[in-house]
Image: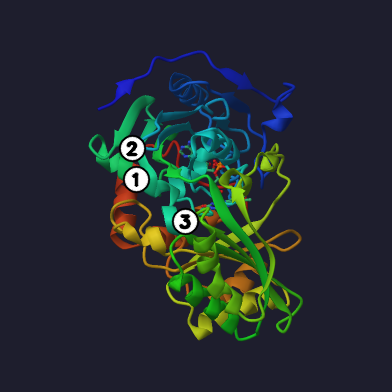
């Protein structure tokens, strides 16, 4: 069931307007849209879509502007920028149910929920927008404890490409609800999400470093230590290298608890990895993990080539390939995120994010002057071990990367539903980066 919205007047910013310079671009990509629409309600989102139709302009949707492919802007088209839709409300404190609008940033969400003793695991950066992350997945600092962000979404409010407004949940428009949790970009424009937050105030934060041997045995130890740890523990690892024999892992360990014993028990196995050194161990408010200090305007300041893959097992060959990718002649910045725990509690067919058995997300990035071919070359050894991919860490989406993100029956259902909800391809996700 859907209701038609009434068309409404809307703020439109064009080249020459004072605000244009700070609205034209995303984090990775400088854009030159013909017009940027700033809707303040679902009715105004519908009006923006109608304007695009009348002027025959291609549409880009933007929440936080942190999308890696630059699909949150375009050249010569109409950008629907949702920044004015940024309300954050606690609907039911006892149930932990909150409503967040798509244009809010995760730093703002964390700040708003902190006084209620609630938190939503989102990502590692506070400037990322709610809309892009919560329609794709959401691998956050508490992912093994909380699951993906999409796993706790209970309803989504959406303006469909035809301008109609829908509130989808498990009992109402279930196909759309399924699609919006993992493959939402391109189905409709999410204006708000109802999400079950977790009761979390402070978390344990530990920073460690350790040398990584060329064979990557250290990474196998890391994977095994996390798998054996309580699911309260989530970790992120960044590899930096000055050559195959000089690779270092920077490990950030976050424990979803303020119980010092649980924090200690969770991180202790990490101390046996290589020659681990602890640099910091303390309790911090969850909001400090995605702080307001992350907020910044997006001016295309961080062009990057980024790809990713999921690993089911850190086999000796896979571990070695990660060290090679991070330490070759044209090294990639390699980041590892632990999965498992609550991510695996969800049936692979329950959402459009099918990847529930993999243990590690690997993200590889290169920055100019490196080009996409350099990244492809560095990634090649890792690609052979990848078992699926996460749509939100891909700067050059194409048929191959979509097939990895949406495999098998999930992919078939995603394509069918995208055709149903957006038959004219008004919102079909593309990208201006890497093209
Ligand atoms: C520095 C950085 C750190 C990151 N860290 C993490 C992380 O820790 N974990 C993680 O899971 N991801 C992470 N990401 C990836 C992030 O999830 C995606 O880039 C996400 O798309 C950003 O959301 P956004 O709203 O800011 O993007 P935008 O650039 O605003 O949007 C990107 C695209 O998403 C779609 N979209 C956006 N809003 C909506 C909406 N309301 N309705 C429908 N479709 C929409 C559109 O296709 C849009 O073009 C990170 C990205 C960056 C750049």
Residue at horizontal 33%, vertical 29%? 166
Rendered image: mark on residue 221: none
Residue at horizontal 43%, vertical 52%? 146
Residue at horizontal 34%, vertical 45%? 179
Evaluate whether residue 229 shows in this view.
yes
Residue 275 x/y as whole percent: 67, 80
Q: CA distance from mark 1 to mark 3?
A: 21 Å
Q: CA distance from mark 2 to mark 3?
A: 30 Å
**Mark 2 or 3, nearer chain start:** 3
Secondary structure of residue under mark 1: helix
Between 282 and 287, the residue placed more toward the observer is 282
Between 3 and 227, the residue placed more toward the observer is 227
Task: Check the image and report above or below for 323 versus 416.
Answer: below
Between marks 1 and 2 in the image, the one whose residue lies nearer the viewer: 1
Evaluate whether residue 59 shows in this view.
no
Residue 379 quadrant: bottom right
Q: How crowded is the residue under tag 1: few (<14 C-alpha within 10 Å), some, or many (20+)?
A: many
- Which residue is denoted by mark 2 in the rendering? 421
Would you say the beta carbon of the disc 3 residue lies within 8 angstroms of ligand 1? no
Residue 122 x/y as whole percent: 51, 47
Residue 280 x/y as whole percent: 69, 62
Between 65 and 266, the residue placed more toward the observer is 266
Would you say the beta carbon of the disc 2 residue lies within 8 angstroms of ligand 1? no
**CB contact under 8 Å: marks 1 and 2:** yes
**Mark 1 or 2, nearer chain start:** 1
- Please, which residue is most extreme toward the left here? 171
Task: Check the image and report above or below for 408 versus 286.
Answer: below
From the viewer's perspective, is 241 left or right of 220?
right
- Which residue is denoted by mark 1 in the rendering? 179
- Which residue is denoted by mark 3 in the rendering? 143
Between marks 1 and 3 in the image, the one whose residue lies nearer the viewer: 3
């Amino acid at each position: 069931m859907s209701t038609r919205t009434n068309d409404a007047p809307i703020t439109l910013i064009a080249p020459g307007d004072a605000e244009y310079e700070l609205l034209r671009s995303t984090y990775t990509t400088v854009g030159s849209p013909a017009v940027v629409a700033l809707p303040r309600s679902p009715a105004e989102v519908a009006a923006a879509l109608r304007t695009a139709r009348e002027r025959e302009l291609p549409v880009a949707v933007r929440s936080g502007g942190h999308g890696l492919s630059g699909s949150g802007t375009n050249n010569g088209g109409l950008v629907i920028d949702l920044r004015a839709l940024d309300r954050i409300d606690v609907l039911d404190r006892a149930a932990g149910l909150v409503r967040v609008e798509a244009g809010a940033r995760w730093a703002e969400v964390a700040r708003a929920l902190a006084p209620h003793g609630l938190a939503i695991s989102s990502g590692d950066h506070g400037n990322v927008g709610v809309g892009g992350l919560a329609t794709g997945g959401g691998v956050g600092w508490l992912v093994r404890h909380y699951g993906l962000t999409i796993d706790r979404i209970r309803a989504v409010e959406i303006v469909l490409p035809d301008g109609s407004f829908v509130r989808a949940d498990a009992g109402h428009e279930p196909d759309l609800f399924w699609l919006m949790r993992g493959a939402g970009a391109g189905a409709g424009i999410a204006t708000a999400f109802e999400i079950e937050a977790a009761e979390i105030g402070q978390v344990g934060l530990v920073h460690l470093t350790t040398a990584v041997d060329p064979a990557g045995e250290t990474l196998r130890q890391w994977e095994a230590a996390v798998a054996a740890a309580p699911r309260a523990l989530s970790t992120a690892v960044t590899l930096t290298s000055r050559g195959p024999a000089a690779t270092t892992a920077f490990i950030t360990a976050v424990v979803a608890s303020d119980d010092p014993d649980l924090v200690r028990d969770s991180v202790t196995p990490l101390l046996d990895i290589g020659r681990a050194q602890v640099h910091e161990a303390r309790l911090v408010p969850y909001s400090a993990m995605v702080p307001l200090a992350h907020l910044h305007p997006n001016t295309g300041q961080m062009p990057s080539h980024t790809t990713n893959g999921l690993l089911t097992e850190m086999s000796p060959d896979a571990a070695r390939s990660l060290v090679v990718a991070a330490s070759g002649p044209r090294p990639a910045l390699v980041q590892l995120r632990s999965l498992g725990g609550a991510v695996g509690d969800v049936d692979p067919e329950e959402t459009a994010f099918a990847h529930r058995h993999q243990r590690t997300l690997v993200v590889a990035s290169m920055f100019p002057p490196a080009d996409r071919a350099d990244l492809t070359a560095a990634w090649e050894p890792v690609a052979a071990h990848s078992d699926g991919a996460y749509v939100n860490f891909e700067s050059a989406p194409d048929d191959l990367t979509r097939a990895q993100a949406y495999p098998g029956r999930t992919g078939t259902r995603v394509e069918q539903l995208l055709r149903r909800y957006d038959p004219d391809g008004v919102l079909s996700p593309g990208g201006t980066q890497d093209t």
